[in-house]
Amino acid sequence: MKNVTIPDGYNQVMPYLIVSNGEGFLAFVRKVFGAEEKYKEMRDENNIKHAEVRIGGSVIMLAQSTEKYQPQTAGMFIYVDNADEAFEKALQEGATEIMKPADQEYGRCGGVQDPFGNTWWITSVE
């Protein structure tokens, strides 16, 4: 695709999640991965219509599920400074263990499923 115009601060491909608890998801990624909220528009006082968070140089978009738009989860691979620490933070914030952090040929990696059904492969390279 030639001459694709991408707004500043966005990536050409970004995950768009539909989660059962938008505020809970935002709190999880802030606490575990240091995400910064870029934007949030509410559908009503309790439901997120559209939100965006930045983790490092990446953007994740999300919305709260509705009857029409049911939850849609994803599997994500994320680089962090310390895989073991991020893995433990994720568990403290309600994630469940998929795989304990272990040394792999590509770095130290562990897997969790967040409380909203998304899988995170948390990886650090030393």
Image (cartoon, helix red, strand yellow):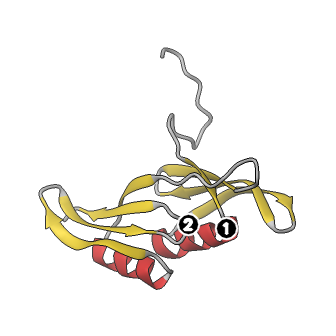
Q: Residue furthest top?
A: 2
Q: Is residue 36 above or below residue 1?
A: below
Give how far across and how far down residue 14 sits, in percent: 52, 43
- Label 2: state its secondary structure: loop
User: Residue at the location (40% across, 62% down)?
Assistant: 120
- Amino acid type of the residue tagged 1 in the rendering: Asn
In the image: residue 109, left or right of residue 93:
left
Q: Which mark is residue 118?
A: none
User: Residue at the location (62% across, 35% down)?
Assistant: 7
Q: Which residue is mark 1?
A: 21
User: Residue at the location (70% across, 56% down)?
Assistant: 65
- Label 1: state its secondary structure: loop
Of the 4 image quadrants, the one containing the C terminus is bottom left
Res 96 seen here = yes
Give how far across and how far down residue 55 sits, in percent: 50, 58
Give how far across and how far down residue 90 sits, in percent: 43, 76
Quadrant of the rendered structure where residue 102 is? bottom left
Q: Is residue 103 above or below residue 57?
A: below
Q: Which residue is mark 2?
A: 116
Q: Earlier in the sequence, mark 2 or mark 1?
A: 1
Circle 2 packing at 10 Å, graded few (<14), some (14-19), many (20+), is many
| Depth order, front residue of 63/40 | 63
Circle 1 packing at 10 Å, graded few (<14), some (14-19), many (20+), is some
Q: Residue furthest left?
A: 105
Q: Residue furthest right?
A: 44
Q: Do residues under tags 2 and 1 come within 8 Å of each other at their CB atoms?
A: yes
Give how far across and how far down residue 61 sits, in percent: 61, 50
